[in-house]
Amino acid sequence: MKSKSLRFIIVILMLFSFSLRGVAQDAAGPEPVGERPDAPPYGLHGPYWVGTRLLTAEPDSDRPLTIRMWYPALNAADAPESITYTIEHGPNFPAATIAGHALAEAEPNLVDGPYPLIVYSSGGGAMPEHNASLLEHLASYGFVVIGAGHPGATTVELMESFISEEGEATYLHNDALVAIYRPLDIQRQITFAETLTATDATFSGLIDAGEVAVMGTSYGGYTAMAAAGVPLNFVAFKTWCAENPADCALQEIAHFPQYEAEMTALVGDRATESGLWALGDPRIDALVALAPGSMPLFDDTGLQALEMPTLFIVGSLDEYGIDAFVEQAYDIINSPIRGKVILQNAGHMFANFTCADSPDYVAFGFFSFCSDPIWDMNRLHDVANHFTTAFLLDTLKGDAEAHAALVPSAVDFVGVTYQAEGY
């Protein structure tokens, strides 16, 4: 009996010792944990605390951008990374909240700066905060991440389109024009970041504007590809729609042809002699496209123009058939460094917040927006975080360990098919 009691006491002391070591680790920096205990290496929280702020670019322009920024931060008080993001839905719908993991208005960590810049584009009618789990995660590895809702197709404007036929028509019209504005908004945000780190004392030396990646989800994936230099071929798009009416109807861009004249006017002198619409920015060095939508706007010639390091991530059961477009694009692009992650049997929403982080959306009837029919969303996040983080550490920071993690022989995840070139 005494022997059992002694062993019990020893176990308790050992556990207490581990607990003290955990507290000491927390005091020194954030705990390296993932959303699940079995998170892969780069799915674990990085070495930096994460701060977040709201900023405004070009407030006096016709299309001011409200930018959410995530960045490496100081946390002298060892405060928990906890924030509640509020998503406005306009005057006719209640707002929703999403639980996040960042320090609001935290002082930037300038000691290890400057940090590479990642410009993020959210899906149609979505906001960057809908994908905060990924963007927070990247900031924890020493990146500055910025993203803005695209005026004309924000969540507020999408929700208002449900009110009436007139509201829907207005949204569809704006949405077509925003297809041109979106990649231009990316350019504006890069310029804003350059100015911010050069002129604002709070952020002086925070951003390395010479190392830039663009990333996007769904319609934002299209945006990222266009901004990275893949030109649009509107003639080929119309031909594809005429030849594939059922597939075209599945795309959120099926209504674009009726607004062709206005879209062409917006493109202006960015149209090439061959008629392609070139909306890219030469300051961008790497591309991550998550379930990229609107892919029929690109043709083979345009895709062949993509030569920068590129990573695709998509679910094999994407509701919009995007997985087939990604498979084709991966084979066509001329990027010598590229990767393709297929999440077997996952759907379109794998990068969104979890329903546990926003009961509001479940109450609104949007359960499918924050869940996957088969996968655990936390596992999807950990896997997507792993590949995205390793890819950007490799391409923007030259991290040898991250590069090694992307060698195909090093990748062995249940439910994940991975292919890569240049590793």
Image: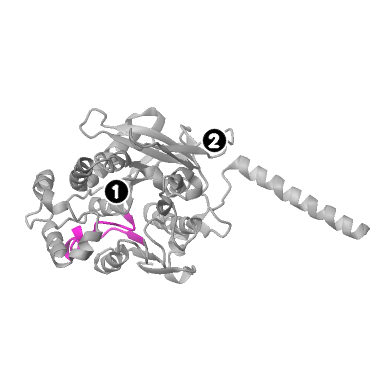
Above or below, comparing residue 324 to residue 159 in the picture: below
Q: Residue at x 24, y 41 (%)?
A: 164
Name the quadrant of the C terminus. bottom left
The outermost residue toward the bottom is 409
Residue 122 percent coordinates (x, y) = 33, 47
- The residue nearer to you, when weighing 379 against 395, is 379
- In this picture, residue 344 sits left or right of residue 196: right
Residue type, mark 1 in image: Gly
Residue 352 percent coordinates (x, y) = 41, 51
- In this picture the colour scheme is one colour
Q: Is residue 36 visible?
A: yes
Dot 1 crowding, Cα within 10 Å, few <14, some 14–19, many 20+? many
Magenta segment includes 303: yes
Above or below, comparing residue 402 to residue 154 in the picture: below
Instruction: Please report the bounds of the magenta region as a residue range.
Output: 287-313
Residue 124: which numbered mark, if any? 1
Q: Distance from label 1 to label 2 (Cα)?
A: 34 Å
